[in-house]
Image (spheres, grey):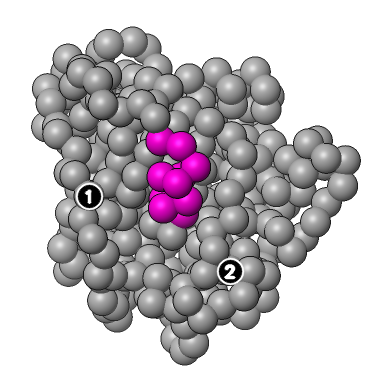
Amino acid sequence: MRLDDFDPDIKVGDEGNRGGGFGGGGGGMLLGLLPLVFSRFGCGGVVVLLGLAFFLGGNPLGLIGGGGQQATVQSGQRPVTGNATQICTANPDRKAACDAFSSADKTWAAVFRQAGKTFTPPTLEFYDRNGQSGCGAAQAAMGPFYCPTDQSIYLDTSFFDQLANQYGAKGDFAQDYVIAHEFGHHIQDLLGTEAQVQQEMQQSDPTQANALSVRLELQADCYAGVWAGLNRDRMDPGDLQEGLTAAHAIGDDTLQEEAQGRVVPDSFTHGTSAERMAWLKRGITTADPSQCDTFSGPIDIS
């Protein structure tokens, strides 16, 4: 994808330049992270998000008609942003991530502005191996994730190598899809989707929780596609296939079959390969966030 260089005013942080204190983590911190973190992008050890439940009535996800209330959560530390030019040019992977992040930032700001809504930009927080988010520990094995408490996307860029070499999802658009998907979770946060889901967390059994997590993740896939669709003039001929290859590689059924030789649908938290491909493609094709309603009725993969 032919993206412009990142805007030097984007909000970027680098935990690697803050000294010690970000190691450790341990089981307790990771358990504390579960209710707040959305998306490990389907890789690096899929974690069941316990306690999610769907709220009834209406489409809470469109950009037209209001966004709902924000969740009340205890705030962790806010990321300390730094010089974007210095942080983003530290290596090529960071540069690529910042370019995609900056593009998503500009694209969604314009969408919100046209809809008469307030857009608050997230922070892109880089870390190496171990870090600390507003939701708790950040570890490379978790994969990229979004923390609504501090409205930040956390990324260890070594995940890009894992995506290409372990999952066979190569190409710049596969990496852009990672950033755009996590940015999609920020859009859900701004619209109140995440808050409404949080309110129902304690009223769900594990199977329902998994099903809701799937719908949340598929919508983030669709929002990633919307970003790409709104920048279709920047897409190269092979980009769509790169994105679909990545979406297929990280489907729950594909990952479970490869890891354990069998598929357990009730344990899905991100969606099947077919579902992830379909919703990413829908977003790209329609370039319309109102077409990303994964919560009303059966999940459509047409």
Residue 90 as seen in the image, left or right of residue 283: left
How many other residues sit within 10 Å of disc 1, few (<14), some (14-19) or many (≥20)?
A: some
Residue under numbered circle 2? 209
Residue 37 visible in the displayed image = no
| Number of marks in picture | 2
Residue sitting at 14 percent across and 34 percent down? 80
Residue 250 as seen in the image, left or right of residue 93: right
Residue sitting farthest toward the bottom: 57
Q: Say which of 253 and 282 sits in front.
A: 253
The segment highlighted magenta reads 25-34
Residue sitting at 59 percent across and 22 percent down? 162
Quadrant in the rendering for residue 78 = top left
Q: Say which of 292 and 287 sits in front.
A: 292
Residue 174 versus residue 287 in the image, above or below: above
Q: Secondary structure at mark 1?
A: loop
- The kind of secondary structure the magenta stretch mainly shows is helix
- The question of residue 33 being in magenta is answered with yes
Residue sitting at 30 percent across and 28 percent down? 22
Residue 56 versus residue 266 in the image, above or below: below
Residue sitting farthest toward the right: 261
Q: Quadrant of the N terminus?
A: top left
Per the model, the C-alpha gap separating discs 1 and 2 is 24 Å
Residue 300 x/y as whole percent: 67, 68
Q: Secondary structure at mark 2?
A: helix
Residue 113 as seen in the image, left or right of residue 169: left
The numbered dot on residue 76 is 1
- Residue type at mark 1 is Gly
- The question of residue 235 being in magenta is answered with no
Residue sitting at 25 percent across and 13 percent down? 89
